[in-house]
Amino acid sequence: MKATEIIAKDLEEIYIGNLNTVEADLQLPEKGRNGSTFTWESKEILFISHEGKVTRPSHGVGNRKVVLEVCAEYEGEKATKSFEVTVLEEPRKIKIVEVEDVKVEAAFGERAELPPVVIVTEETGDFITLPVVWEDYEPCSEEKTIIVNGEIEGEEMQAKASISYRLECTEKEKEYRTDIVESFAPGTVRLLKGTVFAEAQERMFSFIRSVDADELLYNFRIAAGLDTKGAEPMTGWDAPDCKLKGHTTGHYLSGIALAYSVTGEEELKEKLDYLVEELAKCQQGLEEKGWHKGFLSAYGEEQFDLLEEYTKYPTIWAPYYTLDKILSGLYDCYMLAGNETALTILKGAGQWVYDRLSRLTREQRDKMWSMYIAGEFGGMIGILVKLYRATGEKIYAQAAEYFQNEKLFYPMAENKDTLKDMHANQHIPQIIGALEMFKATGEKRDFLIADSFWHMVSGHHTYTIGGTGETEMFHAPDHLVDFISDKTAESCATYNMLRLTSGLFRLNPKASMMDYYEIGLYNHLMASASHTCDGGTTYFMPLRPGSQKIFDTDENTCCHGTGLESRFRYMEDIYMKNDNCVYVNLYIPSQVSIQDFFMKQEITVDGVHKFAIETCGEQEIAFRVPAWSKECVVVVNGERFTKRNSDGYIHVKREWKVEDEVVIELSYEFRFAVSNDDERYVSVAYGPYILAELSEEETYRKAPDLSRMERVMDGNHLRFMEGNRIFVPMADIAEEKYHAYFLRT
């Protein structure tokens, strides 16, 4: 290679960590893999030195953006590259005014299960959790209530637990429920061509097909001591020197399995099978290198060892999170593509997890799971419960129990919003896991955890586009306007919130849940997708005035990974069913086709929803009444149905005929979506769409006069104008600068 080519390649391969949320010193490389010499310069040494030492701003000052510039030199040639780093402000100093008592029951002579945290009230009125160390006590052998005190580190106030002793302790309350509705089988629901949903899906199909399988295997083969077959290493969060490497491969496995389930393309199946078979070889190779049987990752067990020593991020980076992505991808390959080797790998890995965690105490595990980022374990609970269901082997359910994170679960079970300053997507998959546990065991507490969390986030932590979090973090409930920035609404968080919504909806179908789902799907997940076939996804969805999307194509972030999956899940919840009824949840042009049932829905340019329905015999169909529509009428052959059931759906039961004419009359009107903490800040909405104004201004624009808004035709795409101001749905924005929030006076 020429000197300029070597420099360009070395600059491209530089990885210095997740630069969106920096809290610790950066490790700045001095040389590139191909021989370039690096010289670093910080543009703001107050917060980052030229050597990468980080000094966080004081709390209240706000996060700081710092530009780092590296100059690469080789054989007299030079080139530079810049990195934008967000340095997080110091954490808040907490002042508590009250500690909530803990109340538990125990059987005679047994020690009670006291939580490792207590709920405290700050002087702001917000709830948070703090770790507690309980004093030793003697279990009671008579019916009596004893008080146990606990120490909260750094606080004068003590915690107090009341333990009520009974002859026989009440068993954990059970509330076995089965899903009331379920999705149609993969491949039976298709998006209609020509829609924005179908177009986004087709672009991801192209990308999935283009990815080099051997690149995805590179790090695994290196770890296992196997030949890399000449593949190039991956970049960003999957670079050889990144501690999260391997996670993208897991996401890709899910993505290609989902893609195959939609298309049935043999080429996709062959690629999927190749990846799984090679990962099986890597699993065997890791064992031959001396790691424990069943272990599979893109690195050795060192990160897991360090986690058990409570090593902080970024020295290690969420080893169980990465493992979850790999195992979840393999599970999808088994369930959606019938790959039995994937199940064999899963069973070995599940045994490895059980063996590893079963030798730790509960206190050790509690401390691990409460650690910021390092202890992030993603969907480990969920994947292990699924493995238990697939095999019937209880060892996997026990392994899932080891991931119970009481720092999160305890306050959720008590219905106390302690999410302030918690990492959003570190915890949403844990809640999904709690719901999976409920479905497997029937323990009511697990359902309460999931239900309480959903209502907290959807009602008090959600922007008008349906996303949550800022710089990956939850903030105080109903404090959103203060955190409208260029790092709002992480795509991963919304992806997982919609999966949680879907899981809860199956147990108790309500239109209100699909109202929330629809907003997040249309205005965040759809809006996060690149408009080219590069596989790009936004990490954050910027909402500050004059925002501009940045699509991750080569950083291989977590959101890039979930983007590989989400495009193939657009159709998952459009329709659901049970033995008695088909639910129409979303009004997206699509069709569902099974042996004795066919439904196709289309939307005209005028917003008219038409349905073609073919079925044998009598069939009940429930049409959702959207919250945004003042009127909703189902018209069948001229007969009008308007009565809503308590679930928020219009139910029509009849003998359907091929010649039936079915139309859903919905009222598309302009309205303001108001921030629930400050009614002056609004977004412009039209039906399910949040509309953004195309503008490069960096201060809040005045909210438009809705009475002057008018729709203009632009093919299949929606466009709106107020005078000379142009508004478009969030999903239609590519590289333009925009405003999603406006100031109403």
Image: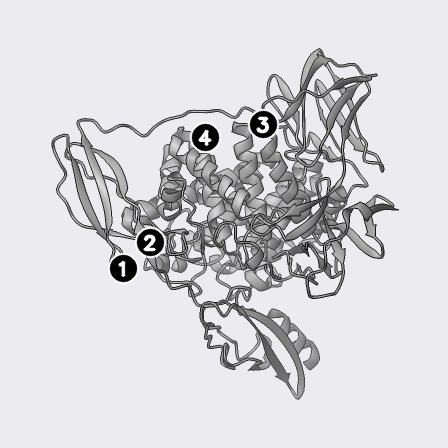
- Earlier along the polypeptide chain: callout 4 or callout 1? 1
Write the residue at 71% across / 51% down: 207
Look at label 2 and name its amino acid: Leu
Closest to the observer, 626 or 210: 626
Residue with the mark numbered 3: 182
Q: Quick check: 629 left or right of 366?
A: right
Crowd rating for badge 2 (residues with CA inside 10 Å; few <14, some 14–19, many 20+):
some
On residue 741, the disc is: none
In-front residue for pair 42/60: 60
Residue 291, how many percent across, how many down?
A: 39, 54
At label 1, the amino acid type is Glu
Real-space Cα distance between discs 3 and 1?
49 Å
Can you identify the residue that label 1 sits on?
155
Residues at discs 2 and 1 in contact (Cβ within 8 Å):
yes
- Label 1's element? loop
Element at badge 2? strand
Q: Position of residue 279 (x, y in %)?
A: 53, 49
Earlier residue among tags 4 and 2: 2
**Residue with the most extreme front position:** 745
Q: Nearer the viewer, residue 266 or 462?
A: 462
Instruction: State the residue position of label 2.
Output: 130
Report the mark closest to the observer, 4 or 1. 1
x and y percentages locating residue 678 in the rendered image: 58, 52
Quarter holding the C terminus is bottom right
Side of 539 relative to 629 (left or right): left
Q: Report how far apart the C-alphas of labels 2 and 3 lie in the structure.
A: 39 Å
Question: Going from the N terminus, do you reach mark 4 or mark 3 first?
Answer: 3
Above or below residue 509? Residue 84 is: below
Horizontal side, residue 579 vs residue 529: left or right: left
Q: Nearer the viewer, mark 3 or mark 1?
A: 1
